[in-house]
Image (tube, rainbow, N blue to C red):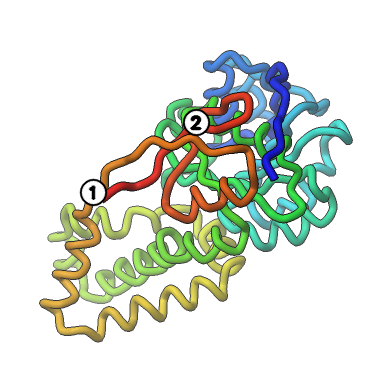
Amino acid sequence: MTLPVPTMAAPPVGVVGLGQLGGSLAAALVAAGREVRGWDVDPAAREAAAARGVTVTRELTGVVVLAVPLPAMATALDGVAADPAATVTDLGSVKGPVLASVGAALGGRFVGGHPMCGTERSGHDATDPTLFRGARWALCLEPGTELPRWLRAAEVALAAGAEVVPVTAAEHDDAVAAVSHVPHLLAAALAAAAGEAGPLALALAAGSFRDGTRVIGSDPAFVTAMVGGNAGPTAAALDRVRAQLERPWPELVAAGHAVRTTAPGRRAVRVPLDRAALLALGRTGGAVTRRLAAFVEGWVPQA
């Protein structure tokens, strides 16, 4: 059933955790004209956010964004005074465990999210207000998710410059295991193997090695929490990689090249505010780019 959602003034956004992702989001929203409040346990992060126009306070209302490490997600709201009516979303790289903890506590007012961006850097010094521009932002639409709250979270992502991909938590975790979590493990394996090859190999390393190992420059605790929190899908995706490596090398190279160099076009679509229709958009590889009164606009891939 399609549910009309009335147009309302954009609510304030409160960001818990003002490191790279949270600080970048807060800065992007300030630049977009949104009212932004934020809190971080680190005084230096609070000071940096205040300098960018964020109101530093524990009193958070509207849409509250949890931008803290995965192990801290379940207790992220303990240190702030969040409005009990606020919509709560997060930026965690794994959605199943967060849905089981934060989602179980908050019910339909929690909307799991994961922007597919970021770098190997971390902390408030890595803040970049353009970080989300053009990025895909997975936003979970579970059976119990309240659609008006999902739309509020989507508006935050769109205001930051991202494109919203409607997914379920399980679909998200399966997908990112293949395109994010396994690449971190492969980067670690490549770097470790090159280290075993000796100093000459490392001295000759150039662009392909740099690009192939970039992500493992991330904080090891972050990577470990990410892959450990999504262990089942990550193991399955890693098995698929192992199977690919068993193929004859010419076949493997050709198959990988074909996938990497395929650039499908885009076809514009308008989707009603309906859970099934929104999830169908995400499953085709499409995304939402604009919110309208009773629809969203977006695109789907076109060969």
Look at the image and tell me whether residue 40 can be seen. no
Are dots 1 and 2 in contact, CB under 8 Å? Answer: no
Q: Which residue is painted at 15% across and 77% down in the image?
A: 251
Image quadrant occupied by the N terminus: top right
In this rendering, position of residue 41 left or right of residue 198: right
Look at the image and tell me whether residue 183 can be seen. yes
What element does badge 2 sit on? loop
In the image, farthest residue toward the right: 84
Where 185 falls versus 12 (above or below)? below
In this rendering, position of residue 120 left or right of residue 86: left
N-terminal-most mark, 1 or 2: 2
Closer to the camera in the image, 220 or 81: 81
What element does badge 1 sit on? loop
Q: Amino acid at mark 2?
A: Thr
Closer to the camera in the image, 67 or 97: 97
Q: Residue under label 2, please give it.
A: 127
Few, some or many C-alpha atoms within 10 Å of disc 2 (few <14, some 14-19, many ≥20)?
many
Q: Residue under label 1, please give it.
A: 263
Closer to the camera in the image, 54 or 102: 102
Q: Which residue is painted at 35% across and 72% down in the image?
A: 189
Residue 33 on image: x %, y %:
58, 13
Q: Nearer the viewer, mark 1 or mark 2?
A: 1
Q: Give the quadrant of residue 148.
A: top right
In this rendering, position of residue 130 left or right of residue 113: left
Q: Which residue is painted at 16% across and 67% down in the image?
A: 201
Residue 149 on image: x %, y %:
73, 37
Where 123 falls versus 33 (above or below)? below
Q: Amino acid at mark 1?
A: Ala
Marks 1/2: CA distance?
Answer: 30 Å
